[in-house]
Amino acid sequence: MWESIRRWFDPRELRSVGETPDYRFSLANERTFLAWLRTGLALVAGGLAAAQFLPPLPLRHLREVIAIALLLLGGAVAVRAVDHWARTERAIRLGEELPTSRFPAILALAVGLGALLLVIAVLDRAVGGG
């Protein structure tokens, strides 16, 4: 694990592996990384917005749980983004198959489940008159 993290900060090590690829592939990999980073930032912003602007919800501390979950998910997306970028860049340089990941599916399920829970909370508040 620490070896992988060290590689994120050592561009010389990355460039020492394999052959220099067509720059378009590296730039596409970087654009994908930046898209994931924007997703992480949006989740962090959502967490801060939930903490600051959501009214108290029917369940005690639900607002705080939502905020913390979004903040943690945003941080996880950012870390996962840099790891995937480094692994993909390495695979491109070595002419290997690109790394696969279940993370997009896990993220989609987490966001979908979170949205469903929020719908239930909003409906409970609306029907319950709270």
Image: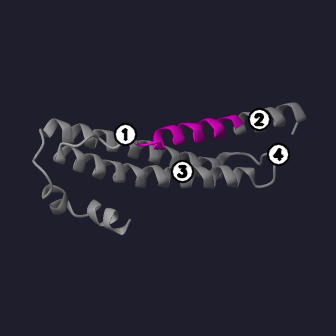
* Amino acid at dot 4: Pro
Label tally? 4
Front position in the image: 96 or 44: 96
Choose the circle earlier in sequence order: 3 or 4.
Answer: 4
Q: Calculate the distance from the C-alpha at mark 4 to the C-alpha at mark 1.
A: 35 Å
Q: Could you give the CA–CA distance between mark 3 and mark 2, rounded to whole angstroms?
A: 21 Å
User: In screen coordinates, is 26 left or right of 110?
Assistant: left
Q: Residues within 10 Å of mark 2 (few under 14, many from 20)?
A: few
- Seen from the viewer's position, the closer of residues 92 and 66 is 92
Which quadrant: the N terminus?
bottom left
Residue under pointer 1: 35
Cα separation between marks 4 and 2: 10 Å
Label 1, label 3: how many angstroms apart (C-alpha)?
A: 15 Å
Q: Closer to the N terminus: mark 1 or mark 3? A: 1
Residue with the mark numbered 3: 73
Residue drawn where x is 58% and y is 49% of the image: 70
> Could you classify mark 4 by the number of other residues whose Cα lies within 10 Å: few (under 14), some (14-19), or many (20 or more)?
some
Give the residue type at disc 2.
Ile
Mark 4 falls on what kind of element?
Answer: loop
In primary-sequence order, the first of circles 4 and 1 is 1
Residue 22 to residue 5: above or below: above
> What residue is drawn where x is 71% and y is 50%?
63
Q: Amino acid at mark 1?
A: Ala
Q: Which residues are magenta?
A: 101-116
Query: What mark, if any, has residue 58 been given in the picture?
Result: 4
Question: For mark 1, does the 10 Å Cα neighbourhood hold few (<14), some (14 to 19), or many (20 or more) residues?
Answer: few
Residue 114 within the magenta-colored segment of the rendering: yes
Name the residue that disc number 2 marks. Answer: 120
Residue type of the residue flagged with mark 3: Leu
Provide residue 18's location: percent of width, then percent of height: 13, 51
